[in-house]
Image: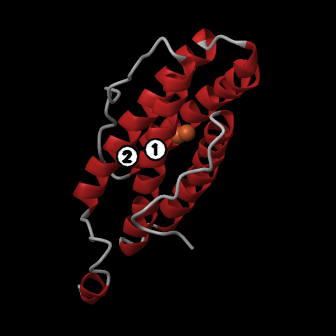
Amino acid sequence: MKAVAEAKDSKSVSREELVGLLNEDLSREYQAIISYVVYSQVLKGAEYMNIAGELEKHAAEELSHALIISNQIDYLGGMPAVAPKNVRTSEKAKEMLKFDLENETETIRNYRERVKQCEELGEYAMAEHIREILKDEQDHLIALATALGEDAPAIKGSGTK
Ligand SMILES: [Fe+2]
Ligand SMILES: [Fe+2]
C-alpha cells in the first residue's frame, strides 16, 4: 500500500489491470507480425532492398515477443488476446516504413511503462522479459528511422534508465 502512494506518477496497476495491459501489448505484437510479414514482401525499389530483408527479421522477432507476452499473461492467470490492432496498408514504401516507425514508437512507450508496473507489483522476472523485448524494439526503431533517413524519434513518457 505504501509503495502505491510513492509511485504516483507512473500509475500503479492491479494484477488484473496488468493482464489487460499485456493483452494490449500482445495485440500490438500481432499487428507488428502482420505488418512486417506483408511489408517485407511488398516493399519495392532498389533503395529498399536492405530494409526489406531487415523487416523479415523483425517479423520473426515480433513472433517471439508475442510468445513471451502470452506466456506472461497465462502466468498471471489471464487469457491471451487473439486479435491484432489495426494494420494500416499503403502502396508507398515510405508510408509503410512510417507506419512501422509510429507503431514501434508506441510499443516502446508502452513497454517502458510496463517495466515499471511489473516492478511495482514485485514481478521482477516479468520486468526483465519486457526489458529484453524493449532492446529489440529499439533496434527496430533505429532500423526504420535509418531507412527513412531520419533520426530515431525521442519517445516521451516514462523514461528508462
Ligand atoms: Fe515486438
Ligand atoms: Fe518491433
Percent x, y of residue 157: 39, 65
* Relative height, residue 52 to residue 11 (above, below): above
Type of the residue with mark 1: Ile
Q: Callout 1: helix, strand or loop?
A: helix
Residue situated in front as seen by the camera: 153 or 22: 153
Q: Which dot marks residue 91?
A: none
Task: Compute the Cα span from label 1 to label 2.
Answer: 6 Å
Label 2, on which residue?
A: 73
Residue situated in front as seen by the camera: 98 or 24: 98
Left or right of residue 46, residue 19 in this image: left
Q: Callout 2: helix, strand or loop?
A: helix
Res 121 quadrant in image: bottom left
For the N terminus, the quadrant is: bottom left
Mark 1 and 2 residues: CB-CB less than 8 Å, in contact?
yes
Kindly tell me whether mark 2's CB lies below 8 Å from ligand 1: no
Check disc 1: other Cα within 10 Å, few if <14, some if 14-19, many if 20+. Answer: many
Percent x, y of residue 72: 43, 49
